Image (cartoon, helix red, strand yellow):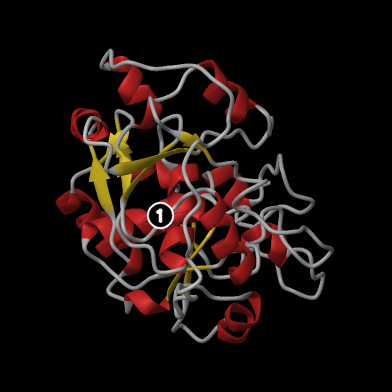
Amino acid sequence: MQANLISADELETLIQSNEIIVCDCRFALNDPDAGRAAFEGSHIPGACYVDLERDLSGQITSSTGRHPLPDVGDWINQASALGLTSGQKIVVYDHGPGVFAARLWWMLGWIGVDDVWLLDGGFASWSKSGKSTIAGEATAELPSSHLTSLREVNDLKADADEILKSLGGGVVSVVDAREPPRFSGEVEPLDAKAGHIPGAINYHFALSLENGQFRSRAELKEIFDQVTAGRNPQNIIHSCGSGVTACHNLFAMEYSGIKGSRLYPGSWSEWIADPSRPIETSFEK
């Protein structure tokens, strides 16, 4: 997948050309309406709002995680309704770190839309630089596009069965993007069980950032070379709580030049939905 960053200055110039689509992905896991409210209060001119739960997630069932992927056909239709096309540059942003924007980046790549750029530093960077904002309802004013020719891009994701079969084999490695206390099982504020997938590696997504923006490609490559320990990137599977912050790690790896890792969309919240799947903890009681 292509992983590209764009600065606030570069975005400001592009907006004047009217040749891009800008998507605001701000969201708060503990307050699902906060992102939409923030958008309506102030957003980048011309942006449309894309909601993690209404637009970027499917139906939750007893066997899914908290933010399951929608059916790929449904997602293609939803992307069309949002006015997203494969023929225009798309810029995605959230409040700053990029985790929700990265989810949209990955989902667009999943249906073959590659010209997607992530605003480095997000809305915080835009605001800090004093650039103009507008207020208004979270309603896209973009014309619908026709994406029926798009199809699912294979080999971008993994499922629980593949991970379960790989446990103890030493080939597939899960990289978990959650905070260390959640990964270790010391605390769990969002899900019913604490811990992590056995054998997983913890790399908190925020380590890819410095002062709210992504580290350089060279720095990230050095970091992920150490995290992956020379493993084939296709055998690296990114996980988190519900398949959101994992996209941030995947973006960072792709941006560093280490390409081909995959996403476990269901992540920890799906893993624990089946009580037969093993759980590991690593904190000292």
264 and 200: which is toward the camera: 264
48 and 193: which is toward the camera: 48
Is 64 drawn above or below residue 16 in the view shown?
Answer: below
Q: Position of residue 146 (x, y in %)?
A: 48, 62
Residue located farthest toward the front when viewing the structure as drawn: 143
Residue lying at 46% horizontally and 68% vertically, measured from the top left: 111
Q: Position of residue 28 (x, y in %)?
A: 61, 33
Is 7 drawn above or below residue 53 in the view shown?
Answer: above
Amino acid at dot 1? Asn
171 and 37: which is toward the camera: 37
Residue lying at 24% horizontally and 40% vertically, measured from the top left: 6
Residue lying at 63% horizontally and 80% vertically, measured from the top left: 164
- Location of mark 1 (residue): 249
Report the label total.
Answer: 1
110 and 224: which is toward the camera: 110
Residue located farthest toward the left when viewing the structure as drawn: 218
User: For numbered disc 1, what is the local secondary structure?
Assistant: helix
- Visible in this render: residue 191? yes
Quadrant in the picture for residue 33 = top right
Horizontally, residue 113 falls left or right of residue 193, namely left
Q: Position of residue 90 (x, y in %)?
A: 34, 48
Residue lying at 70% horizontally and 66% vertically, measured from the top left: 271
Quadrant in the picture for residue 278 = bottom right
Q: Position of residue 69 (x, y in %)?
A: 62, 62
Question: Which quarter of the image is occupied by the N terminus?
Answer: bottom left
- Visible in this render: residue 283? no
Is 127 drawn above or below residue 202 in the view shown?
Answer: above
**How packed is label 1: few (under 14 Cα within 10 Å), some, or many (20 or more)?**
many
